[in-house]
Image (cartoon, rainbow, N blue to C red):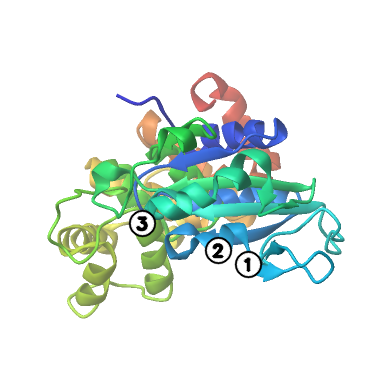
C-alpha cells in the first residue's frame, strides 16, 4: 500500500521538491484538487503557470521541430514557444515560471520518452530551459479506471512520486474559507464519506468529489429550497444517489429555528437533539454569524452539545477570522481553548 498525504501535506512536499530543483509527480483520484494545488503554488510564488497536457502532446512538442541551420547547413530542432528558454526575459509581475506537465502518465510512451531530457536535464531539444523555470507533473491512478500508462523505469527515477488522498476535515476548512454553501458543508460533516464517493467501476454519469461539490455550490447559491425540480441538475453533478440523499437532507432546514428566533430567545429556544438537525443548524449559524448578533448566538451555541458548539465556532472562525476579536467569542474560546484547538 502506498504512503498517501492530504492536500496540506502534499503542498508542502511539492514546494520542497521545487526548492530542491527536483521534479515531483503528483497522483491521486480524479477531482480531488491536484490542479488547484498547483495553481495555488504558482500564485504564492509569483510563477507564471504553463499548463501542458501531455496526453494531448506529440514527441515533437518536447523536442522541437526539425529545421535546417542556415549557417552550418546541419539539422537542428526549433523549440516550441511553450517553453521559456535561458535567454528569455521573465514576464512583468512574475519571478519565473511553473511548467505543469498534467496528465503525465496518460501520455503515450513515445511522448514520455521525449520528456526524459526535459524532466532531468532541463533541455528542450538542444536548448536549455530558463533557470527560473520549475517543473511539476501530475496524473491519475491506474486503479481509478482513468486513462493511465505505466511510467518507464527510466522516467520513474527522474521524478519524486507523491500520492494524494482526500481528507474531509481539511476540505471543510477550505470550503469554509471559500464561503461554500452551508448546506453542503453541513451535509459533508454529517456524511463525510460522500465528499469523495468514487467507485472506479461505477455506472453513473458522474460521481461526488471535491471538484463536483464545488460545481454544485455554484448551482444552488441562489436557491433557498431544493426539490424535485432541481434533482436532475444535482444528479448530473454529484450522481443520482448522492443528489437524492443531499436534497432529502436539506429538508431538515424547514424545521430549524430561524436566526431571528434564536437571537430573540437564545436562552430558552429549543435545541435540537437529532445529529442531522444539529449539523444543519451548526452550518446555518456559522453562515449567518455577524458581529451585531454575536452575543445571543454565542449564548445559544453554548447550549448545544459540546462537540457541536466547537464545530460551529470553528466554522464561524474559518468563514471569518475577524470574529475571534469579538469579546463574547474571545471569551468562549478562552474558556474552551483545550477543546477548541
Q: Which residue is mark 1?
A: 66
Secondary structure state at the residue bearing disc 3: helix
Seen in the image, is 67 located left or right of residue 197? Answer: right
Q: Secondary structure at mark 2?
A: helix
Judge by depth and name the residue closer to the eye, 306 or 276.
276
C-alpha span from label 3 to label 2: 45 Å
Of 63 and 32, the residue lying toward us = 63
- Contact, CB < 8 Å: mark 2 with mark 1? yes
Name the image quarter holding the N terminus: top left
Closer to the N terminus: mark 3 or mark 2? 2
Res 89 quadrant in image:
bottom right
**Circle 1 — which element?**
strand
Mark 1 or mark 3: whose residue is earlier in sequence: 1
- State whether residue 25 appears in this view: yes
Task: Determine the CA span between mark 1 and mark 3.
Answer: 53 Å
Numbered circle sitting on residue 60: 2
What residue do we see at 48% from left, 38% from top?
Answer: 155
Mark whose residue sits in front, 3 or 2 = 2
Q: Which residue is mark 3?
A: 184
Query: Crowding near pointer 1: few (<14 within 10 Å), some, many (20+)?
Result: few
- The residue located at (34%, 57%) in the rendering is 257
Amino acid at each position: 500500500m502506498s504512503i498517501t498525504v492530504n492536500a496540506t501535506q502534499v503542498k508542502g512536499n511539492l514546494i520542497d521538491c521545487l526548492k530542491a530543483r527536483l521534479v515531483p509527480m503528483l497522483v491521486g483520484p480524479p477531482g480531488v484538487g491536484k490542479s488547484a494545488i498547483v495553481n495555488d503554488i504558482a500564485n504564492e510564488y509569483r510563477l507564471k503557470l504553463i499548463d501542458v497536457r501531455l496526453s494531448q502532446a506529440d514527441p515533437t512538442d518536447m523536442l522541437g521541430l526539425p529545421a535546417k541551420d542556415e549557417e552550418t547547413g546541419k539539422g537542428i530542432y526549433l523549440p516550441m514557444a511553450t517553453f521559456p528558454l535561458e535567454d528569455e526575459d521573465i514576464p512583468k509581475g512574475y519571478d519565473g515560471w511553473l511548467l505543469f506537465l498534467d496528465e503525465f502518465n496518460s501520455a503515450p510512451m513515445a511522448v514520455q520518452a521525449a520528456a526524459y531530457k526535459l524532466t532531468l536535464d532541463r533541455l528542450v531539444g538542444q536548448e536549455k530551459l530558463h533557470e527560473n523555470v520549475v517543473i511539476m507533473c501530475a496524473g491519475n491512478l491506474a486503479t481509478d479506471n482513468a486513462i493511465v500508462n505505466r511510467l518507464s523505469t527510466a522516467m520513474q527515477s527522474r521524478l519524486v512520486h507523491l500520492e494524494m488522498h482526500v481528507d474531509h476535515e481539511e476540505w471543510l476548512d477550505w470550503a469554509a474559507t471559500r464561503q461554500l454553501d452551508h448546506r453542503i458543508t453541513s451535509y459533508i460533516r454529517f456524511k463525510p464519506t460522500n465528499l469523495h464517493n468514487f467507485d472506479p467501476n461505477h455506472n453513473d454519469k458522474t460521481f461526488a468529489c471535491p471538484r463536483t461539490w464545488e460545481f454544485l455550490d455554484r448551482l444552488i447559491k441562489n436557491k433557498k429550497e431544493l426539490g424535485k425540480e432541481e434533482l436532475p441538475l444535482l444528479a448530473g453533478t454529484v450522481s443520482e444517489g448522492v443528489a437524492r440523499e443531499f436534497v432529502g437532507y436539506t429538508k431538515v432546514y424547514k424545521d430549524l429555528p430561524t436566526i431571528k428566533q434564536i437571537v430573540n430567545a437564545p436562552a430558552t429556544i429549543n435545541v435540537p437533539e437529532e445529529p442531522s438537525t444539529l449539523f444543519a443548524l451548526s452550518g446555518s449559524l456559522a453562515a449567518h454569524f455577524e458581529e451585531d448578533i454575536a452575543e445571543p448566538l454565542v449564548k445559544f451555541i453554548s447550549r448545544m452539545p459540546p462537540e457541536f458548539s466547537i464545530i460551529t465556532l470553528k466554522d464561524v472562525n474559518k468563514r471569518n477570522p475577524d470574529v475571534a476579536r469579538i469579546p463574547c467569542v474571545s471569551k468562549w474560546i478562552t474558556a474552551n481553548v483545550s477543546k477548541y484547538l
